[in-house]
Amino acid sequence: NAGVTQTPKFQVLKTGQSMTLQCAQDMNHEYMSWYRQDPGMGLRLIHYSVGAGITDQGEVPNGYNVSRSTTEDFPLRLLSAAPSQTSVYFCASSASGNSNQPQHFGDGTRLSIL
Amino acid sequence: TQLLEQSPQFLSIQEGENLTVYCNSSSVFSSLQWYRQEPGEGPVLLVTVVTGGEVKKLKRLTFQFGDARKDSSLHITAAQPGDTGLYLCAGAGDDYKLSFGAGTTVTVRA
């Protein structure tokens, strides 16, 4: 089973460039989310979605956009990359928006902004 | 500011020793989850504790949720090199969001 698939695994960007991080899940999960992981800071929620067509901001949403046109896909867009966005990005999904549900994570995208 | 404080930040022990990782907060959570993350991979759920005072065992791992549902601990008995990894706790509130601790890096030396 594929679970949560993130692409690309690695990416290097120049300041000011834009790009989209892809996330797809094949478990028919309603809830999807994006986190960034930085040393010593754990995982911080960027944006989340409780179902197709519905998105909301998390703890650190500035500089990022999301959309949820299908249940399976939840892309994360960096509008104008900044060095402060250098991080490891994780996409996660769960069966419902109930925060007691276990999160299934992808293997991450390692992003460097020069 | 981290909503959940994990301690210690790093832990290095010899194979066969025991260890305990703590997860503390001033907030009450409806549930608390523990994840383990290995290098180059995403976190994987180990356990969810829901009831105050609850104790769950997963082979050599024992998880406890505080009576007031503000803190939790993870105890590993007779640690093995395969237990090496980053252990993360995550608290669930009433909204659709999980709050993660910064993690404890555990290294078990053979």
Image: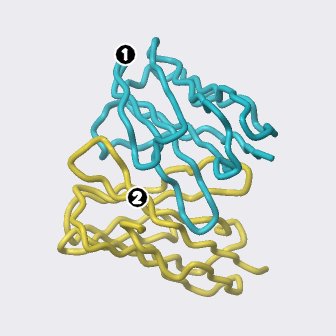
Chain colours: A cyan, B yellow
Q: Label 2 marks which chain's residue?
A: B
Q: Position of residue B97 (x, y in %)?
A: 34, 46
Left/right of residue B62 with respect to residue A96 in the rendered view: right
In which chain is the residue bearing label 1? A
**Front residue of this view, candidates A78 and A50:** A78
Q: Residue at 44% across / 31% down in the picture?
A: A32
Secondary element under disc 2, as helix, strand or loop, is strand
Among the 4 quarters of the image, the one containing residue A7: top right
SS class of the residue under badge 1? Answer: loop
In front: label 2 or label 1: 1
Q: Position of residue A29 (x, y in %)?
A: 42, 25
- Left or right of residue B42: residue A26: left
Quadrant placement of the N terminus of chain B: bottom left
Outermost front residue: A16
x%, y% of residue B98?
37, 50
Q: Quadrant of residue A47?
A: top left
Name the amino acid type tagged 2.
Ala
What residue is drawn where x is 44% and y is 73%? Answer: B74
Q: Is residue B33 above or below residue B74?
A: above
Please give the residue where the numbered disc 2 appears in the rendered image: B90
Identity of the amino acid at label 1?
Gly
Q: Label 1: which residue?
A: A53
Same-subunit check for callouts 2 and 1: no
